[in-house]
Image (tube, rainbow, N blue to C red):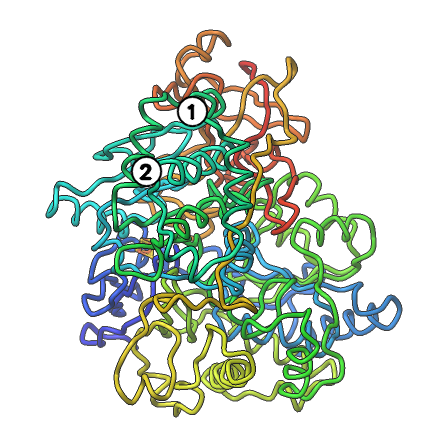
Amino acid sequence: MHTFDTPWIKSTCAYCGVGCGIEAKALANGRIEVRGDASHPANLGKLCSKGLALGETVTNEGRLLTPKVNGEDCSWDSALTEVANGFLETIKQHGPDSVAFYLSGQLLTEDYYLANKLMKGFIGSANVDTNSRLCMSSSVAGHKRAFGTDTMPGCYQDLDHAELIVLVGSNLAWCHPVLFQRIKAAKAKYPQRKLVVIDPRRTASCHGADLHLAIKPGTDVMLFNGLLNYLAKQQLTDTAFIEANTQGFAQALTIAALDAPNIEHIAQVTGCSVADISAFYQLFGSTDKVVSLYSQGVNQSSQGTDKVNSIINCHLATGKIGREGACPFSITGQPNAMGGREVGGLANTLAAHLEFDSPEEHQLLSQFWQTKKLAAKPGLKAVEMFDAIRSGKIKAIWIMATNPVVSLPNSNKIKAALQNCPLVVVSDCIADTDTGRLAHVQLPAMGWAEKSGTVTNSERRISRQRRLTTSPGAARADWWIISEVAKKMGFKAAFSYRHEGEIFREHAKLTQLAHEHKQHDLDLSGLANISDAEYAEMAPQQWPVTQLQKEANTVQQRFFGDGKFFTPSTKAQFIAVHYLTSPQRLSSAYPLILNTGRIRDQWHTMTRTGLSPGLSSHQGEPLLLINPQDAQACSLSSEDIVQIDSPQGQAQMRVQINNDIKLGQLFAPIHWSDSNSSAGKVTRLTLDLTDAISGQPEMKQTPVSLKRC
Ligand code: SF4
């Protein structure tokens, strides 16, 4: 039984990609007290409202307590047998590509590693994708095109040193609040530092900003092509860096100059003033230390990868990369989106940043896993995967720790697909979710406070998540559930783990072999032989972690400072990107653009943050933000309930008239589902249009119409 003198245990926040360290203590009443971990480099003791309320969300209320098959409680053995036999039978009849796993950035790295190993390595299909596809897959693709690998070049300390921070498509103040506070603290100490926000909305991140460019949705490539052209015209490029360390500058510049010949044209396309655009370009060009921090506003677009590369192009052109206070910085939405990327949680990558298109790398992984079945080609990305379920090509899916019936775009289609899928397995800690209701088999997973493993944050920092309390009912760790199913499928030798630390060591060992083979970025060789005790005590650390670094107690905070990239030529690649308008066009039937995003105190589909009365008091119901003139044109007043229609579906929300929204645009939060609102689910409206390279859906600009209910 817990007493008041239980120790403080160090762990990691359950929410965003900042990856704040927490300390937690079990209380006599069964609850958990949470405070910031002052020793954790990501947050230095600070937490935002969501992190501070973590203790309120650790409750057994609403938990899935037992395995269920077709709604009936059953033993673990029966449920695992049902899953294993269901998958085996489907594979026998229809082949390995008839099954799929859909994972989550909420999973720990060890869970992710095993799911990927089972599907790609032993089932023989790469149909394993993740909700991280909705978060930052355009950044992954952009990194790979420019750097040769999915490498985050900088670290959070760069935010302390940058003389100019450019926030692109990110409401950092609400979505990554601890980093925003860090930027504000540096700006308060050094008032000459500048903050520029590029976002169609005037958000909380604009408070204290020196400049806000309210660009029209989707025009980022035009703005950054214009910047590249300006830098070249004004001779503000770093010619020595370009010549020594990059390729493709001339071609990228030619396209940029064609797209964005002058600031007047850029102003017309982006909707910003000539003066504001000029001010931004001058600031970027004249400032030595610039961090461009970007998030879903860039990534969630039918041109997301090009947007990422248009930003990276400007950093390469000025040599603003690999140095203190200078880098393009993709900030991830989820607590372990990065960990998933490291172990191959995306359908188009292998584990340890190995690639499908290299026969040697494929062979290396096959030998390491001792399998002859390693998938030979990339699998289906998230939206494609659910399309394949709808068309009947995929007949069995296992969804882990995520709620795609709420979070994926065009959610009516997702729901219909799962309703017709012969086998839907859902492992989750919550009993009643929109997705769980469609499951044939439900498997009770441990919640955040009960799990043990590792996560990686946006600056490549691996942190331990530690068990803080016991699990209710029959809940089990995700890695245990996956390995038990694998054993029942006949893969006992490859999945006989005693402990999550064994899985981590295997992952680290694989990165060592991969690095020895291709001399790339991800190298955890210094952690490949750690003992269980060292794993238990592991302090937060940035990768790479080599044996030499471990012995010398040194850290590589940044990549590319030596001018060497991971492309075949070792040079960074400029990518020539044309500005494209979205295929989603306004019309007389759908004359307004709907933007989507998060609110300050909620997380994803609210299954956890919704348990906190404090967090729920910020905004209690689905809302639609609208400009006063549009409200007047639609005869709407604040507090009216409005029906929103798109070609995909309809939803109802309460109107909030808001001067921060531009004319012709709307904003709605993503958090509400069929479980917590009768009609406020915003993904009923969004189209499942994706970026052709990354597969990331365009969630930020849907044409809609409005009428008062
Ligand atoms: Fe958690 Fe992110 Fe808030 Fe940090 S900033 S406390 S990781 S939600």
Residue at image coords 46%, 12%: 630
Across and down, in percent, residue 403 comes to: 57, 52
> Is label 1 in a helix, a strand or a loop?
strand
> Is label 2 in a helix, a strand or a loop?
loop
Amino acid type, callout 2: Ser
Residue at image coords 36%, 62%: 459
Could you say which quadrant of the image residue 495 lies in?
Answer: bottom right
Residue at image coords 44%, 8%: 632
Q: Quote the CA–CA distance across marks 1 and 2.
A: 18 Å
Q: Which residue is mark 2?
A: 617
Across and down, in percent, residue 386 comes to: 71, 51
The relative height of residue 32 versus residue 139 in the rendered view (above or below) is below
- Considering only order in the chain, which callout, 2 or 1, is on the residue closer to the N terminus? 2
Q: Which residue is mark 1?
A: 625
In terms of image quarters, where does ligand 1 lie?
bottom left
Mark 1 surroundings: few (<14), some (14-19) or many (≥20) residues within 10 A:
many
Do the residues under discs 1 and 2 have CB atoms within 8 angstroms? no
Disc 2 residue: CB within 8 Å of ligand 1: no
In this rendering, position of residue 68 left or right of residue 143: right
Mark 2 surroundings: few (<14), some (14-19) or many (≥20) residues within 10 A:
few
Q: Nearer the viewer, residue 572 or 96?
A: 572
In this rendering, position of residue 267 left or right of residue 162: right
In this rendering, position of residue 235 left or right of residue 84: left
Q: Nearer the viewer, residue 324 or 623?
A: 324
Check the picture and name the quadrant holding the C terminus: top right
In this rendering, position of residue 258 left or right of residue 224: right
Kindly tell me whether residue 408 is visible in this rendering: yes
